[in-house]
Image (tube, helix red, strand yellow):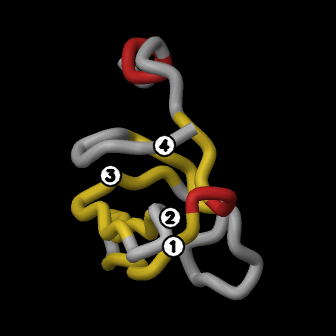
Amino acid sequence: MSFEKDDQAVLHDKHSEFDGETGTITQVIENMFGDATYTISFDEGQETGVPENALEAVEAESDAADE
């Protein structure tokens, strides 16, 4: 699954301080081979160069559950 700017996603990277946190995709960078890496922003910072396989899509209904 590819992501677009402003999508919500959960980061899965055991080496990141944001592992398991939900953030917002702020930038999509596609390389010459057609693969994309992402910049994802969190409340406390951002992570750059994130590969697609390290992200999990967040369902839109989860926003309603926070209320």
Residue 21 point in image, percent of width and height = 55, 58
From the image, tell me which residue sits under label 3.
24
- Type of the residue with mark 2: Asp
Residue at x 49%, y 51% (from the top left corner): 22
Specify which label sits upstream in the sequence, 4 or 2: 4
Distance in Å between CA atoms under marks 4 and 1? 12 Å
Q: Quadrant of the N terminus?
A: top right
The dot on residue 2 is 4
The dot on residue 35 is 2
Specify which label sits upstream in the sequence, 1 or 3: 3
Label 2, residues with CA under 10 Å away: few <14, some 14-19, many ≥20? few
Specify which label sits upstream in the sequence, 4 or 1: 4
Q: Badges 3 and 4: C-beta atoms under 8 Å apart? A: no
From the image, tell me which residue sits under label 1.
50
Q: Mark 4: which secondary structure?
A: loop
Residue at x 40%, y 54% (from the top left corner): 23
Q: Badges 4 and 1: C-beta atoms under 8 Å apart? A: no
- Type of the residue with mark 4: Ser
Q: Badges 3 and 2: C-beta atoms under 8 Å apart? A: no
The label nearer to you, 3 versus 2, is 2
- Type of the residue with mark 1: Val
Q: Quadrant of residue 20?
A: bottom right
Distance in Å between CA atoms under marks 3 and 2? 19 Å
Q: Mark 3: which secondary structure?
A: strand
Label 3, residues with CA under 10 Å away: few <14, some 14-19, many ≥20? many
* In the rendered image, the vertical position of residue 64 relative to residue 5, given as above or below: above
Residue 16 point in image, percent of width and height = 61, 83
The dot on residue 61 is none
Specify which label sits upstream in the sequence, 1 or 2: 2
